Image (cartoon, grey):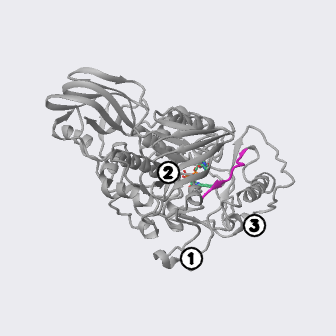
């Protein structure tokens, strides 16, 4: 069989949201990058193959790349269709400059040079070719940490003893149990009663006694995340066997809903069953720091914070559906907590980063960090960290973390990633200029906080026709305008459908978002758009001006008011 050799600076394994964000962020910062994804689509558990919702911190919605994807989805995926969502994720990677993508390509070996990875090789099943990728840095975003057994990187599996990290929620004794796997189902409402005949091999649930604590009436945004098994087996080696059990369960539960009691489902039909199990937990790498329960519950105040979490400690019982008690515990941290860069690179392999559910945490820590918007921000952090490592002379991850952390944090905040307790650097030019507005408080546009925080809106509230203007006091050269619009971070957070109602959801961009605006340099328009639906907008310009004006011309909801968080020029 033929082997194609690629030489890049950065190679990402796994194209879930973490891997996608790592690859896109690095590529956008000029790093020659390749992403190897074993499935035909990107998105991992968020893709149409598995169909989980992108969740994150309930206190503070994640911004940066994941917000870019979600806003594109609100704009384009009006009728909430999974293939449209897949196509958005596909185009974000496939058409990104500096980024090579290999779909249907599964990483299966690695070549080492001492404690460094020299190359990895994947098998692409559609072309029957091997792809060998030589790179300076690698990021394992495969969820299952495929590079751990291939490189000798240190990893953990299972649940720690509570004594090891002082975790009150952990077990007395350690074990190798994990959260389980799930094959989800989706149903569709129709206008007339629909029959369902179960396959003979499906399990039978004649009454509700085996489904206590598992809500299964068709209502609201109910989904079937609790159809979970495999946490007491090996969540990698036993995947095929667990899948068979999950399919028997999935069809059996739909049979129960349709044929064994009133579940409000007479007019509903089975629309889709996932044959690819979604995984919650397997190998977790060991980095220079291991995030644990105390960090999640006390705000994670780290100098090297590069991302944050906020999802509850949502630990599932390893018995899954075979355990008749509540399927999970759910303990909400009181505030978002920082996640340090030291959790995102290997302790013993010199050029290995990671992002996603396989970062350096305890089992209890993972039960909060594992949700996909958090994973996406971890990926974006790795992408920016790699770009800093490259720019500073191909430093190791550890050197980059200790010597260039503020540079990485600045890059992330400039790319609209919020870091708890950090403030974005506003360009000196803007800080020193005179800033005025036709109405409202324009100082919000340069306070370095781009979201509502601690009861302060931090936004310039504006109406159609309003202007905000910098007077630099002399003619200056400008190369880029950076704007952050209000995409309503308190909006409903679902990015896809759970089930399909006859009167289904319709998506549209948030009504607070400025959709039409222009930029004027000394009164002359240098940029004009009537079709903005993004929160972060960076506009390349080449102009010399004394005054720079933002004029608001319209909002996405056709309303007359909305907001802007930042207006930078440099
Ligand atoms: C049933 C279920 C319900 C969940 N509910 C939610 C929820 O509601 N909201 C939420 O945000 N999170 C939820 N989670 C958790 C979340 O989905 C995962 O923790 C998250 O997907 C992890 O992101 P990731 O990018 O690390 O991995 P993944 O999303 O798994 O992506 C990793 C990708 O790497 C690919 N890959 C693996 N091995 C290789 C290889 N050798 N070569 C190349 N590619 C490879 C995989 O195919 C996959 O596409 C749920 C998980 C499950 C299983």
The answer to whether one can see residue 147 in this image is yes
How far, Cα to Cα, is label 1 from label 2?
31 Å
The answer to whether one can see residue 505 in this image is no
Front-most of 249 and 113?
Answer: 113
Rendered view: 333 above or below 551: below
Front-most of 136 and 458?
Answer: 136
Q: Which residue is mark 1?
A: 171
How far, Cα to Cα, is label 1 from label 3?
28 Å
Front-most of 105 and 426?
Answer: 105
Q: Residues within 10 Å of mark 2 (few under 14, many from 20)?
A: many
Asked if the magenta segment contains residue 15, the reply would be: no
Mark 1 vs 2: CB contact within 8 A: no
Residue at the extreme top: 524
Q: Is residue 291 left or right of residue 246?
A: left
Q: Residues within 10 Å of mark 1 (few under 14, many from 20)?
A: some
Q: Is residue 570 left or right of residue 172?
A: left
Mark before the other along the chain sequence, 1 or 3: 1
The quadrant of the picture occupied by the N terminus is top right
Front label number (1 vs 3): 1
Front label number (1 vs 2): 2
Q: Tell me which segment is drawn in magenta.
A: 272-280
Mark number for residue 209? 3
The quadrant of the picture occupied by the C terminus is top left
């Amino acid at each position: 069989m033929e082997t194609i050799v690629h030489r890049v600076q950065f190679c990402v394994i796994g194209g879930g949201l973490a891997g996608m964000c790592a690859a896109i962020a690095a590529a956008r910062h000029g790093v020659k990058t390749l992403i190897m994804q074993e499935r035909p689509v990107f998105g991992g558990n968020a893709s149409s193959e598995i169909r989980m919702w992108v969740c994150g911190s309930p206190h503070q919605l994640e911004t940066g790349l994941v917000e870019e994807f979600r806003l594109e989805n609100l704009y384009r995926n009006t009728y909430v269709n999974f293939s449209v969502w897949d196509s958005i994720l596909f185009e974000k990677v496939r058409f990104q400059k500096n980024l090579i993508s290999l779909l249907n390509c599964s990483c299966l070996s690695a070549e080492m040079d001492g404690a460094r990875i020299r190359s990895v090789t994947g098998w692409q099943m559609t072309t029957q070719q091997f792809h060998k990728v030589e790179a300076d840095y690698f990021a394992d975003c495969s969820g299952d940490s495929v590079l751990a057994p291939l490189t000798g990187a240190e990893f953990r599996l299972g649940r720690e003893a509570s004594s090891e990290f002082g975790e009150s929620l952990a077990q007395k004794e350690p074990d190798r149990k994990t959260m389980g796997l799930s094959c989800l189902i989706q149903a569709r409402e129709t206008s007339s009663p629909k029959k369902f005949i179960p396959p003979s091999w499906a399990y039978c649930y004649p009454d509700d006694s085996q489904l206590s604590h598992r809500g299964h009436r068709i209502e609201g945004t109910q989904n079937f995340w609790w159809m979970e098994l495999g946490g007491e087996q090996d969540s990698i080696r036993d995947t095929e066997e667990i899948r068979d059990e999950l399919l028997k369960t999935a069809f059996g539960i739909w049979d129960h809903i349709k044929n064994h009691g009133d579940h409000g489902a007479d007019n509903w039909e089975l629309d889709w069953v996932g044959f690819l199990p979604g995984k919650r937990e397997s190998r977790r790498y060991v980095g220079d720091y291991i995030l644990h329960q105390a960090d999640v519950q006390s705000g994670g105040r780290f100098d090297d914070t590069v991302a944050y979490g906020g999802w509850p400690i949502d630990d599932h019982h390893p018995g899954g559906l075979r355990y008749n008690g509540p399927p999970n515990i759910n303990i909400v941290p009181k505030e978002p907590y920082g996640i340090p860069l030291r959790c995102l690179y290997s302790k013993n392999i010199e050029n290995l980063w990671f992002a996603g559910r396989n970062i350096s945490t305890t089992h209890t820590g993972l039960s909060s960090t594992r949700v996909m918007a958090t994973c996406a921000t971890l990926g974006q952090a790795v992408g920016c960290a790699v770009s800093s490592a490259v720019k500073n002379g191909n430093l190791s991850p550890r050197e980059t973390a200790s010597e260039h952390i503020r540079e990485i944090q600045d890059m992330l905040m400039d790319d609209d990633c919020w870091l708890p307790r950090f403030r974005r650097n506003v360009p000196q030019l803007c800080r020193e200029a005179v800033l005025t507005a036709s109405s409202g408080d324009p100082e919000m546009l340069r306070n370095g906080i781009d979201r509502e925080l601690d009861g302060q809106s931090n936004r310039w509230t504006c109406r159609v026709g309003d202007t905000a203007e910098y007077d630099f006091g002399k003619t200056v050269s400008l190369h880029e305008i950076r704007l952050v619009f209000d995409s309503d971070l308190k909006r409903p957070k679902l990015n896809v459908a759970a089930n399909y109602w006859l009167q289904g959801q319709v998506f549209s961009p948030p009504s607070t978002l400025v959709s039409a605006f222009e930029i004027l340099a000394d009164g002359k328009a240098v940029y004009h758009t009537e079709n903005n639906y993004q929160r972060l907008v960076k506009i390349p310009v080449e102009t010399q001006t004394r005054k720079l004006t933002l004029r608001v011309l319209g909002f996405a909801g056709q309303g007359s008011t909305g907001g802007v968080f930042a207006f930078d020029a440099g």
